[in-house]
Image: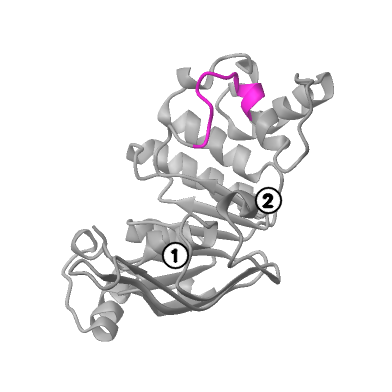
């Protein structure tokens, strides 16, 4: 579903600030895989996600989504393939519009727009049923402005909006980092449920090693723009935090004492 082949990205080339963020990165995601990505600051995690989304063009290599080469496609054209939830709960929604209007926008993604506007009765019932899945009571507040919601409620709504059209690829960009631990846990549980029930292919960036271990079917670790660790299946299920720290030290040649040092 996602294939990166020898992807290279360098910022400020030829200057004293030159940074080789991605160095010949290869990564393949099969349909239905939920992959968590960890690594320290400067490992290339955010660059990877933004390269896939088309925020930044790459200097070399290819990016394919469901077999289609999207390397040269701008961000707005890749939006037809991708759903994304950002770190900031204020992004991904229109705060001055109602909950049902935000869902309608998400539902109409990629469609031709006319002069008429409105949420039909059948759409309203569909959105009500979708909102019930969140378990936050938002199905009874569909005419409320999104700006009135809490950060956790907005992230849950953004997650629903991003998955509403069953995108080829769901990108979760540290989408719980700005939430308190209890709310973050609920949003992660919801992420698991939506990915599984809709059989989505998902790529989740996180700074939290425990979350990376607890969620998804596969975990990759990045370091200096490359994947240095890739573990899936039964092996991932039995991984511990100490296992990851030990493997990072062996592969990266650096000894880190805690996940706070490694991942922040």
Residue extending furthest toward the front: 14
Mark 2 or mark 1: name the one nearer the start of the chain.
1
Q: Residues within 10 Å of mark 2 (few under 14, many from 20)?
A: some
In the rendering, which numbered label is found on residue 234? none
Residue 48 is labelled as 1
* Helix, strand or loop status at disc 1: helix
> Residue 203, how many percent across, how many down?
52, 60
Q: In front: 199, or 61?
A: 61
Which dot marks residue 80? 2
x then y, percent, for residue 207: 33, 57
> Split into 4 quadrants, where in the image is the N terminus?
bottom right
Question: How many numbered circles are shown?
Answer: 2
Whether residues under marks 2 and 1 lie with C-beta atoms below 8 angstroms apart, the answer is: no
Q: Is residue 147 above or below residue 19?
A: above
| The image quarter in which residue 28 lies | bottom right
Q: Residue at 43% of width from left, 32% of height from top? A: 90
The quadrant the C terminus occupies is bottom left
Please report the bounds of the magenta region as a residue range: 92-102
Which of the two residues, 35 or 74, is positioned nearer the viewer here?
74
Above or below residue 206? Residue 24 is below
């Amino acid at each position: 579903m996602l294939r990166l082949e020898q992807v290279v990205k360098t910022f400020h080339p030829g200057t004293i600030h030159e940074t080789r963020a991605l160095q010949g990165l290869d990564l393949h995601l099969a349909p239905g895989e939920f992959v968590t990505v960890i690594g320290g600051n400067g490992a290339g995690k955010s660059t990877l996600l933004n390269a896939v989304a088309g925020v930044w063009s790459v200097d070399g290599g290819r990016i394919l989504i469901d077999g289609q080469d999207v390397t040269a496609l701008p961000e707005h054209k890749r939006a037809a393939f991708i759903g994304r939830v950002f770190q900031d709960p204020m992004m991904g929604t229109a705060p001055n519009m109602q909950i049902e209007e935000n869902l309608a926008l998400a539902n109409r993604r990629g469609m031709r727009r006319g002069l008429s506007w409105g949420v039909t009765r059948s759409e309203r019932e569909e959105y009500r049923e979708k909102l019930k899945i969140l378990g936050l009571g938002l199905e009874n507040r569909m005419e409320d402005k999104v700006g009135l919601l809490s950060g956790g409620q907005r992230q849950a709504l953004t997650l629903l909006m991003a998955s509403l059209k069953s995108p080829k690829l769901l990108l979760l960009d540290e989408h719980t980092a700005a939430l308190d631990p209890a709310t973050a846990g609920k949003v992660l549980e919801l992420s698991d449920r939506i990915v599984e029930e809709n059989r989505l292919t998902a790529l989740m960036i996180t700074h939290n090693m425990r979350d990376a271990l607890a969620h998804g079917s596969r975990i990759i670790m990045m370091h200096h723009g490359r994947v240095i660790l890739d573990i899936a299946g039964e092996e991932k299920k039995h991984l511990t935090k100490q296992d990851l720290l030990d493997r990072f030290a062996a592969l990266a040649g650096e000894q880190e004492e805690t996940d706070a040092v490694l991942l922040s």
